[in-house]
Amino acid sequence: MSAPARTQLEGLGLSSTCVDVLRHLWDYLDDEITPEGAARLRAHIESCAQCHEYEAYQSCFLESLAKLRRELGAPKSLRDRLAEKLRGEGCRCWEQARSRH
C-alpha cells in the first residue's frame, strides 16, 4: 500500500512539513536522507508536539523490532519468502538490511 497523497494529508489539516515527516520519517530514522533533509525534519520534530510523538513511537517500534530480530532470528525459509515479496514490490530495503548485518 502506498502512502496517502500529499493533498490528502494536507486536507486533514497537516502542515506541509508534518506531511514530510509522515512520508519520510523511516528514511530519516535509517539515515537514508540528505543531511539537509534530516536537519529540516529534525528541526520540525523538535518544534511540533504531534510529530515529536510520532517520531518517538516509530523510533521505539523500529528499535523493538530490531531487538526482537536479534533475539529471535527467523528461519531461512521465512527470510527468503519475505525477501522475494519485498523484491516483487520493488523494495530494495531487504538487500540494504542484509548488507548491514
Image: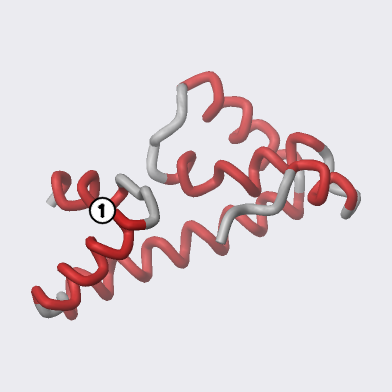
Question: What's the image's color scheme?
Answer: secondary structure
Question: 89 or 14, which lies in front?
Answer: 89
Q: What amino acid is at disc 1?
A: Trp
Residue 27 place in picture, x, y as percent: 46, 41
Query: Which residue is tagged 1?
Result: 94
Left or right: residue 77 compared with residue 83: left
Vertical position of residue 33 compared to residue 101: above or below: above
The extreme front residue here reads 88
Which residue occupies 67% across, 38% down? Answer: 20
Residue 75 in which image quadrant: bottom left
Which residue occupies 53% across, 60% down? Answer: 58
Number of numbered markers? 1
Which residue occupies 31% across, 64% down? Answer: 85
Density class for disc 1 (Cα within 10 Å; few <14, some 14-19, many ≥20) is some
Residue 92 in which image quadrant: top left
Quadrant occupied by the N terminus? bottom right
Left or right: residue 59 compared with residue 98: right
Which residue occupies 37% across, 48% down? Answer: 90
Left or right: residue 42 compared with residue 100: right
The extreme top residue here reads 36
Residue 89 place in picture, x, y as percent: 39, 55
Question: 57 or 92, which lies in front?
Answer: 92
Q: Secondary structure at mark 1?
A: helix
Residue 67 in which image quadrant: bottom left
Residue 40 place in picture, x, y as percent: 62, 27
Question: 31 or 6, which lies in front?
Answer: 6
Left or right: residue 40 compared with residue 92: right
